[in-house]
Image (cartoon, grey):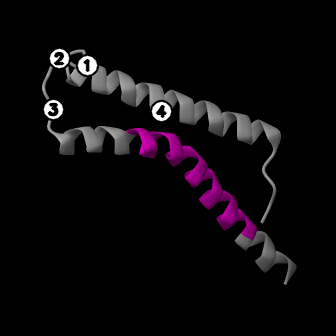
Amino acid sequence: MVKRSEGVRRIVLLVSIVATLGWALFVVITTEGFSVKLDPIEWGIIMAGFLVAYFAAPTTSRIVYWIIDGFSKDKNA
C-alpha cells in the first residue's frame, strides 16, 4: 500500500480533532450543558459518537489510499 505523506497525516489528525470537538460541542448544546438527565443507552451513543468522530477521517483516508493503490497496481500489470 502507498505510504501517506506527512502532510496528509497532519490533515487527517487535524480533521479528527476538529470532528471530535464538533461532536463535543453538539453534545453540550443538545444536552443544554449536560443539565438534561440521560439514560445509560444515550450516554453509550454519545461515547460511540466520539469514537466515530475521531476514527472517521483516518478510516476514510486509508480507504482512499487503498483504492488509489489498486489503480496503480492495474497500471503496472
Quarter of the figure with the C terminus:
bottom right
Tell me: 3 left or right of 33.
right
Does the residue at mark 1 contact the one at mark 3 (Cβ under 8 Å)? no
Q: Which amino acid type is shown beneath numbered disc 3?
A: Leu
Q: Nearer the viewer, mark 4 or mark 2?
A: 2
- Mark carried by residue 35: 2
Q: Which amino acid type is shown beneath numbered disc 2?
A: Ser
Residue 36 lies in what quarter of the image?
Answer: top left
- Mark carried by residue 29: 1
- Mark carried by residue 38: 3
Q: Which amino acid type is shown beneath numbered disc 1?
A: Ile
Q: Earlier in the sequence, mark 4 or mark 2?
A: 4
Residue to which mark 4 is pinned: 19
Magenta span: 50-69
Label 2 secondary element: loop
Q: Position of residue 19 (x, y in %)?
A: 47, 32
Tell me: 32 left or right of 4.
left
Q: Earlier in the sequence, mark 2 or mark 1?
A: 1
Q: Position of residue 76 (x, y in %)?
A: 86, 78
Does the residue at mark 2 contact the one at mark 3 (Cβ under 8 Å)? no
Q: Residue, x 27% and y 44% (percent of image)?
A: 45
Q: Which amino acid type is shown beneath numbered disc 4?
A: Ala
The secondary structure making up most of the magenta span is helix
View extreme (front): residue: 40
Residue 59 forms part of the magenta stretch: yes
Spatial CA span between label 2 and label 3: 9 Å
Spatial CA span between label 4 and label 3: 23 Å
Spatial CA span between label 1 and label 3: 14 Å
Q: Nearer the viewer, mark 4 or mark 3?
A: 3
Q: Earlier in the sequence, mark 1 or mark 3?
A: 1
Tell me: 76 left or right of 12.
right
Quick one: 65 or 74, which is closer to the camera? 65
